[in-house]
Image: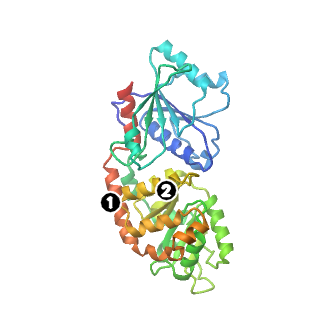
Amino acid sequence: MNRSLATRQWDIFCKVIDNFGDIGICWRLAADLASRGQRVRLWVDDASALAWMAPTGCEGVRILPWREPLAPADLECLNTAPTDVLVEAFGCEIATEFIATCAHAAEARGIKPVWINLEYLSAEVYAERNHALPSPVLRGPAAGWTKWFFYPGFTAQTGGLLRKPGLAQRQAAFDRAGWLNRQGLEGIASHGETLVSLFCYEPPALASLLRQWADSGLNGRPVHLLVAAGRAHLAVKAAVAAENLQFNDKKGLQPPADARNQLSISYLPLLTQVDFDHLLWACDLNFVRGEDSIVRALWAGKPFVWHIYPQDDDAHRAKLDAFLDMLGAPPSLRAVHHIWNAGNPTDLAEKHPADGLASLMADLPAWQKTVLKAQARHLAQEDLTGVLLKFVEKTR
């Protein structure tokens, strides 16, 4: 913890949309701030996911329900610990009754809180252009205040990436075989299989990829697929049924009935954030989805494929290409990303050779070099929490 930075009261507001990425990022930020000596109140409209993401909680972080409207009793905490920093995550609008109470307290103290609008992660150029720009508040109880846009990103001209201190030391001490054993996957670390994690939405190419792995494995080795709970689990079940796929479903611990079968599948329970990191560290190839997990995959330093959150206006395609440009992705990695992110089966059939998806992964060693190079570059930059703390000190 940087003792030169003052301890402040942070209020982070989060609305859970659908896939828990928002609450996951907000929890990581809140816990990281608390680990650096800050006090955090996390206001969330649905905190149920934290029961499995962070079951032990975090000292210094208080979870509060974001009701609509907030009642006077909900706001009493502002009387004893007024807000120093407001964080409005991902376009959610902080409750007006909370802002009114903050404004009253700020007038009495003679100090306005720093108001941060935390945006989504992107490698596109607008993240640099818009980072740290002010937005005057023109009406309401906080008229005359300023909101500040804070853009996470991949360059030193943005807000950086979430990274808890001590990452390298934790990875160096990681016991891969021991962790796999604790997940009920005893012995698979020594089976010679390629371990692949799968955390995805419903990619049209999934069924074809599973078929290719069942027929031929990956780069001459059998594949053991570790499937995350939730939508990925359901997607794999549907793909297996659609393909009438036969695979080893006993965690790879017994030979499959068909010796030609090169695919084993294990379905995982919901994992804590710590164990999700461990899953990525344990695998040889990671399929991840959304914003939080792409950062975790980068820190894992293993080859990965990103299933970007699809948007109706196809804005995600430009976002994906900007990310691949930043990564310096070789042609095979770009091709796999474009196949994996094809919007529908018709689009996939017309534009992408899904039946060649596994063959493109023959370039896995080049992917590894690409990821490690990007990882080293970003480890040399300051992390998001550190940038945010300094920004608050400078702005107050």
Q: Position of residue 207 (x, y in %)?
A: 60, 72
Q: Is residue 250 left or right of residue 388?
A: right
Element under label 2? helix
Which amino acid, mark 2? Arg
Q: Position of residue 256 (x, y in %)?
A: 61, 82
Residue at mark 2: 317
Q: Is mark 2 in CB contact (under 8 Å) with mark 1? A: no
- Name the residue nearer the viewer: 73 or 313: 313
Q: Position of residue 228 (x, y in %)?
A: 58, 61
Tell me what residue is drawn at x 49 percent, y 56 percent: 317
Q: Residues within 10 Å of mark 1 (few under 14, many from 20)?
A: some
Q: Give the answer, above or below, for where 259 lies relative to 201.
A: below
- Name the residue nearer the viewer: 275 or 119: 119
Tell me what residue is drawn at x 61 percent, y 21 percent: 76
Name the image quarter holding the C terminus.
top left
- Name the residue nearer the viewer: 367 or 174: 367
